[in-house]
Amino acid sequence: MPSKKSISVSYSRNKIPDNQQERLKTIGWITGYVDGEGCFSVSFIKNATTKSGWQIFPEFVVTQGGKSKTSLEILRNFFGCGKIFVNRRHDNHREHIYRYCVRSQEDLRKVIIPFFEEHQLRTAKKKDFQCFTFILNQMKLKKHLTQRGMQMIAKRVEKMNHKKASRFLKSSETKR
């Protein structure tokens, strides 16, 4: 982790240091940190209050143990959006897990996606980000409100992260 001198915790939405060297260090650190520790995910959640019975739930997440919670605060302060949640652990681990999450579609579209489009990821996570961006664009176009659109999104989701088969595609409601 970089020294505390190279990253300030006082950023507001996309405000980066005036000093070019500090700005590049911060942007590089964030991009690399997310490349290693972040996740762009889209989940299908059963929800009886929606017309289709399913809700599509995109989120950007970075998870860390309690000792590294400060790094999540740096991300939240830098991006100016999202929240940090605690997953209290009562097993043999000695620290709780913290998750920095951005779930607002507006914040994802206006803050997170533009940042990573400008400062591109370098690992396989780049493909996950591209799928994530595509899905959010489809949702903006309201494609997720049709059965066909939801199936197309679910097939994209299967290509992300661990390439797990979508619960939505296996559901009997999907096979109508």
Image (cartoon, rainbow, N blue to C red):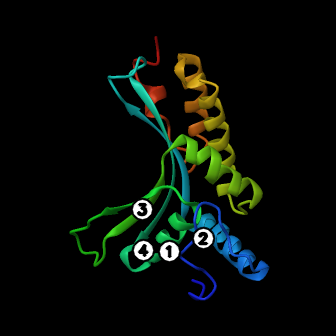
Label placed on residue 71: 1
Q: Which residue type does callout 4 highlight?
A: Lys
Asked if marks 2 and 3 touch (Cβ < 8 Å), the reply is no
Circle 3 sits on which residue? 99
Instruction: Work out whether mark 2 precedes mark 3 in sequence or the reverse, and give the earlier one.
Output: 2
Q: Considering only order in the chain, which callout, 4 or 3, is on the residue closer to the N terminus?
A: 4
- Which quarter of the rendering shows the N terminus? bottom right
Q: Which residue is mark 4?
A: 69
Residue ID for mark 2:
33
Q: Are marks 1 and 4 in contact (CB under 8 Å)?
A: yes
Alpha carbon distance from label 3 to label 4: 9 Å
Residue 113, image x, y percentages = 66, 50
Q: Residues under labels 1 and 2: Cα distance? A: 9 Å
Marks 4 and 2, how far apart in space? 13 Å
Taking the spot 73% from the left edge, 63% from the top edge, the residue there is 122
Does the CB distance between marks 1 and 2 fall below 8 Å? yes
Between disc 1 and disc 2, the foreground one is: 1
The residue under the point 56% across, 87% down is 4
Pointer 1: residues within 10 angstroms few (<14), some, or many (20+)?
many
